[in-house]
Image (spheres, rainbow, N blue to C red):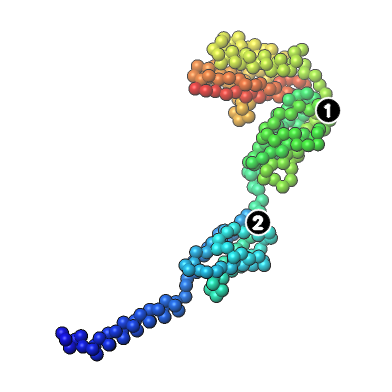
Amino acid sequence: MNSFFSKGNLIVFGTLIVLFGVCGIIKSCTQETEIRAAVSPLNVELGKAIYYSDSTSGAKSVLWEFGNGDVSKDPKGSYIFTHTGKYKIRLTVDYDKVVSFIVNVNDRKMATEKERVRIIAPSKAMVNERVVFMADGDADSWNWEFGETGIVDSRERNPIYVFSKPGQHEIRLLAGNMEYPITKTIDVVSSDFTITGDPRSEIENDIQEHLQDIIDKKNFNSNYNYILNKYLSKKHGGRGDNTLVLVNNTNENDFYSYCNGLKIMGKAKSTFIESVTMENNPDGSIKRLLINQSSTK
């Protein structure tokens, strides 16, 4: 045992330990640090941002170059290119370690037919008539001009507008996802409402009252026939039972089926007719009833 721990052996073992330690230090100092970085997305539409980040261990400085002269010294962030093209993004870490990414900046996608917005509205209307305009399509904002004021008249998706002057009016709709407005021409004519001698609002209120009576379980036949015979029958230019009814700008049905639905709904829910608006034919007869209603269980 004493010979194993002799002075000579101890010197040898000590020297080996020192050598192994030195080798480890040299290896750790000379081993190249791996760059850990990412850029996303690599294919982007013009006007949309890319996101870059560097998480290289022990990095003391970073330099992002975006291939167009712009640079950033922030380890991570976002960037928006102003022109289409292919860009080589280069990241330099600690002045000597480099990695590159290729980003393709493409033109904005053209809207498909399904995505395009269109105007749904009659081609003819009368002065003082409440005309319903509907926007078919997807957008996050709506700007309607009805050709009389020269300004934006409504920011609703499906507005109601009353023309005060006859003539041809160009309707303009600029939705949030459109670069240019779409247009539709509507011919507004001077004509008095001729179904009855009652003012228009009184007719709408009268219809609203009798529809509410159907919901409230009052005599179905008398209320249904009252509206049908007084306002919707063929002698008034209407379509009778087949007159269209649009509910809350979403559900459309014929008048008979709609009223039967109210009768059933009245037994199960508390339903309230909030408003009735008439959409008219050029001769003044009722083309469609536009009804807003709400229900609670």
Residue at image x 69%, y 18%? 204
Task: Give, as a three-letter code, the residue at label 2.
Answer: Leu
Residue 75 place in picture, x, y as percent: 55, 63
Question: For numbered disc 2, what is the local secondary structure?
Answer: loop
* Earlier residue among tags 2 and 1: 2
Task: Using the image as rendered, state which of residue 251 and residue 104 is in the foreground.
Answer: 104
Q: Quadrant of the N terminus?
A: bottom left
Residue 261 place in picture, x, y as percent: 55, 20
Q: Which mark is residue 166?
A: 1
Residue at image x 75%, y 36%? 152
Residue 173 place in picture, x, y as percent: 73, 39
Residue 23 place in picture, x, y as percent: 38, 81
Q: Which mark is residue 101?
A: none
Residue that sits furthest to the left in the current view: 1
Task: Using the image as rendered, state which of residue 171 and residue 225 is in the foreground.
Answer: 171
**Residue 35, placed above or below residue 24:** above
Eye-nearest disc, 2 or 1: 2
Task: Give, as a three-letter code, the residue at label 1.
Answer: Pro
In which quarter of the view is residue 67 placed? bottom right
Report which residue position mark 2 lands on: 46
> Is residue 56 something that shows in the picture?
yes
Within 10 Å of disc 2 (Cα), the crowding (few <14, some 14-19, many 20+) is some
**Residue 242, placed above or below residue 115:** above
Within 10 Å of disc 1 (Cα), the crowding (few <14, some 14-19, many 20+) is some
Q: Report if the CB atoms under discs 2 and 1 are less than 8 Å apart.
A: no
Residue at image x 68%, y 59%? 82
Distance Cα–Cα, label 2 vs label 1: 45 Å
Task: Using the image as rendered, state which of residue 253 and residue 27 is in the foreground.
Answer: 27
